[in-house]
Image: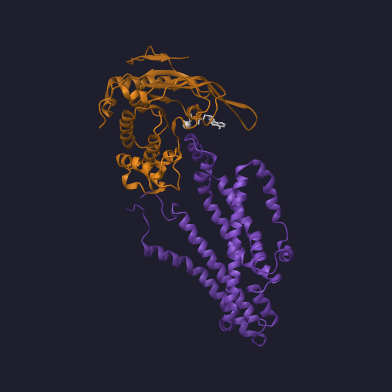
Amino acid sequence: MSVIAAPPPRRRWSRRLANAWPPALVLAVVVGLWAGVGALVHAASDVLPGPDLVVRSTWQDRSNLWPAAWTTTREAIFGILAAIVVAVVLAVAIDSSRTVRRSIYPLMVASQTLPIIALAPLVVIWFGFGPLPKIALVALFTFFAIAVGLVQGLASADVDATNLLRTMGASRLQLLLRVRVPSAIPQFFTGLKVAVTYSFVSAIVAEFVGAQQGLGVYMTTAKNAFRTDLVFGAVLVTAILTLLLFAIVTVLERLALPWRRPASATGTP
Amino acid sequence: MAPARERYGDAMSAGARLELRDLRKRFSQADGSALTVLDGVDLTAEPGEFVAVIGPSGCGKSTIFHILAGLEDASDGAVLIDGVQTPKRLGVCAFMPQRDGLLPWRRVIDNATIGLELAGVPRAQARERALPLLERFGLGEFARAWPWQLSGGMRQRAAFLRTVLMGKPAMLLDEPFGALDGITRGDLQQWLLDVWDEVGSTVVLITHDVPEAVFLADRVYVMSPRPGRIAAVVEIDLPRPRTLAIEESPQFAAYESRLRAALRGRTDPVDEPAAGTAGERP
Ligand SMILES: Nc1ncnc2c1ncn2[C@@H]1O[C@H](COP(=O)(O)OP(=O)(O)OP(=O)(O)O)[C@@H](O)[C@H]1O
Ligand SMILES: [Mg+2]
């Protein structure tokens, strides 16, 4: 039996469409400008290939591009997963103990001031040319957003709810699992979405430094061969993959938070 | 309907005896000064009794509950449970906070059973116990709804169900029917009496509402404005079981005016023609 007053599906779809057309319009304008400028500087098509050329060349080169994209995708995803593990451990430790909070939180913030790009060569020296240094760098780039979201989310737990469970004799672990962690999930996903937008970029930067496979290698090779069309293609693929990952996280967020009151529902059923 | 109540029968043994002796509470404020909230409160709830506490906003009613439930320590004075000083009180009383305290990420049934879950009762068994009560509390259809889908009165019923299900010998209800309209309120009061009748546990109830205190309680403690003291204690000698019709009786009106006078700070009972006994304190 369902008591959930979900809006009828048609209305939901029309709302989604209504949300989708403004960015689509802007995108169309940008692509139009790109095509226009590309046509104007036609002679120098090496510098700014038009959209049609980019799509055509990229499609033709797909047998090289797909494996590269797949390698980078794997690095990005494993990097994010590693970042989640690190962030959860750090956030729970920071949340549970004031000593840990005072000693680790400043260092965690300070770690973000390190020029991580400059560290990349070192990481490659330590971990070799395989996927490991890329995963490590992605994790380094992205754990912070997730950890900060989690720390804030855990701290946002309702005092009244915590007190209520305390009067029921709840242990600290029970309070963590039944009040603090559920309270933190919305902000965890906010952090994760930020992290996801960095993930491909950081994997590619790591590949620039030294790799056998991946979009970073692909771009370097294309650039060295003056194939700007393929560089553009790889950039486009990166953007699409990042958006895909973002969309997956958004779906997971919705699945993880079925209890959230939909923004459209005002009043009680 | 509940069976006729045996006021001092076997059911009483299920309730705990709560006693506060000269309870004092000071909070230290941000500027370093101390805020005295409770300044010598004496209160007793005998096993199975229904006791109400009324008093102006900010006089320390909720603070009394926080101390009884073990969330706060007293600055001075004694808290006795079944005659024994009990410094570790968390988990002893079932506490219903002023805001309903429903966890937004748990369905109504899982909110209702959380106390049992924390006590280690297997989930299936906890649900089995909760379901018939949900039906009875008019929440059967909403067992799998999320808290935001409930109306204010339904939320309070769910929170009350959670409190009852814990099966504790004492229940502390902090304005359980606050912010409800008169009709809903009357229904819930009637139904609270029925439940109390069955479970036989001791109940302490905080309210702003004078008729509510008279209708429900065996004894009403009236508090002074902050710093909170007991300004008057009024025994309510109305027959049980009570129905809402009793509100029309002249004794009921007499108790009401007497409590209102005490709330206004006039504790002299001589000109109040109330029936029953009363103990007044300065
Ligand atoms: N943890 C605390 N720290 C400092 N002051 C507090 C704390 N808890 C309560 N107080 C103060 O104690 C006083 C009494 O609060 P309490 O919540 O007990 O009042 P109340 O009688 O329940 O009021 P109401 O009827 O409005 O719920 C208030 O002035 C409040 O500011
Ligand atoms: Mg209060």
The foreground one among B9 and B228 is B9
Depicted B182 relative to depicted A70: above or below: above
The part of the image, by quadrant, that contains residue B6 is top left
Residue positioned 62% across, 50% down in the render: A90
Depicted B247 relative to depicted A136: above or below: above
Depicted B216 relative to depicted B147: above or below: above
Q: Is residue B215 left or right of residue A57?
A: left
Q: Is residue B282 left or right of residue B247?
A: right
Q: Which chain is purple?
A: A
The foreground one among A102 and A267 is A102
Give coordinates of residue B69: x percent, y percent. 48, 30
The part of the image, by quadrant, that contains residue B196 is top left
Residue positioned 62% across, 77% down in the render: A232
The foreground one among B186 and B72 is B72
Q: Is residue B168 visible?
A: yes
Give coordinates of residue B212: x percent, y percent. 36, 28
How many numbered marks appear? 0
Give coordinates of residue A76: x percent, y percent. 60, 65
The residue at the far bottom in this view is: A43
The foreground one among B155 and A210 is A210
The residue at the far top in this view is: B270
Give coordinates of residue A220: x percent, y percent. 68, 76
The part of the image, by quadrant, that contains residue B5 is top left
Chain B shade: orange
